């Protein structure tokens, strides 16, 4: 298998074609939109968070390349059922491990749009909680 | 479309570009990202090298042999560029690139405008001919208007007439759209602009590398282009301006070189073109652009234009045979092929093409407003130049089939 087939392996394309937790959510605790200005990838993330700061439901609405969409889809599975404290410090390395494919430096921003969106969503949530 | 058999020999030309010998991911490089930047012939690369090895000195001020040689070479380059576009020597101002050129004009030409004065651009513009005007309008209370495109992705004639009026002070239009290849009728727009008493600027970034330019014929007041898309080095561009207008305009950058006499209470400015060239310029790059212009002249701009059309026609024919391809832009276009593969994002198209050694561009091409008009977020863009071949187009087409195979579309 060459590099490119490794990158676009079946599970990545499955997530791209049928993203998990796809859609929008009414009454989300946090809804955050993030955009990658360089390439135009976009992601809407909706989190339903309960009183114990647990993410009880998540919806993602990504538009963009296979890498950014697959990343959003996988991350939505990853964080569902976890607490905000568990996910707020997720790292770039965790995302890359989750994707499990070689990512070139120029595509890193595609892979990490989901993480940026999650991080900013947790920040918005915490700011809101403090009020 | 005028069909003329090309008389230039592409194989000979290819030998002049060392980079075309390299391999990418083990495959021969197919460079179709010429609208972003062109490759450079050995003559241009050598000219930079020769300057630094033999006569590196500051221009216009060092009274010694090296300074004389550097100044002569730098000013000779200006002379060649003036000839290349049929302008006078003093009308050629060196800048860093088109973006700087357009900013220069945006700052200099708006200084006398009043609140409510109008500036007209189009929906096709690159951000570099968009954001400067938008921000000037915002800060100075000017009104920015947009010529719309029609269903063929050409500037709409009615919209041109409707937007350019007696209230218009500046019209700034790209000659060729970098995103979709539309060739705009800049001569007609210049005429309409002048009938309304306004100034006409043309952003020629994509035109200067591809079509013969004649400033007298186009008759715009200003014409802006960049060196690195026309076989020259990065870091050098040109603003052409009609002499009397440049003389009447305020300088953009202040400092050394652009002055005549500096006193504690005031400064008088240098003559044209140096009035607009503050600070030590990109000397080697300016000289390099002169060499690039020599190269283009040697091949012949009409030959390049004919060859562009030949190759574009070939590529269009081939790409249309593939299912699920959308091509953007008008039928009559410059050598820019902007497209999407159904079900695949442009980034992924570009990544997979790269695995076959094919370099294209994917994204919004610095034209986010245009993308929103077209209702898309990105396209894949192949752009050709004089050293590209039909065989390379075949490789590109095969790579698109690979994209479709990987994505199962």
Image (cartoon, helix red, strand yellow):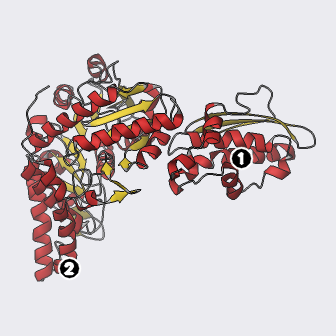
For image coordinates 66% across by 44% down, the residue present is A114
Residue B367 at least partly seen: no
The front one of A125 and A14 is A14
Mark 1, residue position: A120
- The answer to which quarter of the image holds residue B2 is top left
- The answer to which quarter of the image holds residue A74 is top right
Q: Position of residue B79 (x, y in %)?
A: 9, 58
Q: Position of residue B391 (x, y in %)?
A: 25, 42
Q: Could you say whether the residue bearing mark 2 is in a helix, strand or loop?
A: helix
The front one of A105 and B23 is B23
Mark 2, residue position: B53
- The answer to which quarter of the image holds residue B282 is bottom left
Residue A13 at least partly seen: yes
Question: What is the C-alpha distance between the residues marked 1 and 2?
Answer: 52 Å
Q: Is residue B14 left or right of residue B394?
A: left
Q: Is residue A12 left or right of residue A106?
A: right
Chain letter belonging to callout 1: A
Chain letter belonging to callout 2: B
Q: Is residue B383 left or right of residue B300?
A: right
Above/below status of B200 relative to B225: above
Q: Nearer the viewer, mark 1 or mark 2?
A: 2
- Image quadrant in which the C terminus of chain A is located: top right
Packing grade of label 2 (10 A; few <14, some 14-19, many >=20) is: few
Above/below status of B401 relative to A115: above
Q: Position of residue B362 (x, y in %)?
A: 43, 41
For image coordinates 15% across by 73% down, the residue present is B70
């Amino acid at each position: 298998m060459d590099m490119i087939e490794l990158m676009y392996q079946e599970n990545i394309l499955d997530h791209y074609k049928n993203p998990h937790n796809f859609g929008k959510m009414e009454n989300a605790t946090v809804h955050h939109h993030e955009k990658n200005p360089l390439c135009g990838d976009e992601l809407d993330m909706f989190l339903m968070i309960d009183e114990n700061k647990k993410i009880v439901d998540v919806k993602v609405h990504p538009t963009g390349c296979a890498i950014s969409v697959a990343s959003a889809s996988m991350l939505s599975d990853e964080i569902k059922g976890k607490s905000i404290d568990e996910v707020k410090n997720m790292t770039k390395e965790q995302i890359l491990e989750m994707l499990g494919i070689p990512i070139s430096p120029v595509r890193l921003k595609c892979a990490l749009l989901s993480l940026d969106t999650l991080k900013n969503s947790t920040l918005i949530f915490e700011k809101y909680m403090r009020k | 479309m005028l069909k003329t058999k090309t008389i230039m020999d592409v194989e000979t030309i290819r030998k002049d570009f060392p980079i075309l010998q390299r391999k990418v991911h083990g495959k021969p490089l197919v460079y179709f990202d010429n609208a972003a930047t062109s490759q450079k012939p050995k003559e241009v690369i050598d000219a930079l090298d020769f300057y630094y090895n033999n006569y590196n000195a500051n221009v216009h001020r060092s009274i010694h042999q090296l300074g004389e040689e550097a100044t002569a070479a730098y000013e000779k380059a200006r002379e060649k560029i003036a000839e290349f576009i049929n302008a006078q020597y003093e009308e050629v101002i060196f800048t860093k690139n088109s973006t700087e050129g357009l900013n220069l004009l945006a700052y200099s030409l708006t200084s006398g405008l009043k609140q409510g004065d109008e500036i007209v651009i189009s929906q096709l513009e690159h951000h570099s001919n968009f954001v400067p005007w938008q921000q000037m309008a915002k800060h100075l209370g000017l009104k920015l208007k947009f010529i719309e495109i029609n269903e063929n992705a050409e500037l709409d004639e009615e919209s041109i007439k409707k937007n350019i009026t007696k209230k218009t002070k500046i019209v700034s239009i790209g000659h060729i759209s970098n995103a979709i290849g539309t060739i705009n009728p800049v001569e007609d727009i210049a005429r309409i602009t002048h009938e309304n008493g306004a100034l006409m600027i043309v952003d020629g970034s994509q035109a200067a590398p591809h079509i013969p330019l004649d400033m007298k014929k186009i008759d715009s007041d200003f014409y802006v282009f960049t060196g690195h898309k026309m076989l020259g080095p990065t870091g050098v561009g040109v603003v052409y301006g009609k002499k009397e207008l440049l003389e009447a305009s305020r300088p953009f950058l202040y400092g050394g070189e652009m002055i005549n006499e500096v006193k504690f209470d005031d400064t008088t400015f240098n003559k044209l073109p140096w009035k607009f060239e503050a600070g030590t310029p990109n000397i080697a790059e300016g000289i390099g652009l002169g060499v690039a212009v020599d190269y283009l002249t040697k091949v012949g701009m009409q030959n390049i234009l004919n060859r562009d059309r030949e190759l574009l026609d070939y590529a269009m024919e081939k790409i249309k045979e593939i299912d699920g391809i959308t091509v953007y832009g008008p039928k009559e276009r410059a050598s820019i092929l902007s497209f999407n593969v159904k079900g695949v994002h442009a980034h992924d198209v570009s990544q997979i093409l790269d695995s076959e050694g094919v370099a294209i561009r994917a994204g919004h091409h610095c034209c986010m407003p245009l993308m929103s008009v077209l209702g898309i977020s990105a396209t894949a863009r192949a752009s050709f130049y004089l050293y590209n071949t039909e065989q390379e187009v075949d490789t590109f087409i095969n790579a698109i089939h690979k994209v479709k195979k990987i994505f199962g579309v």
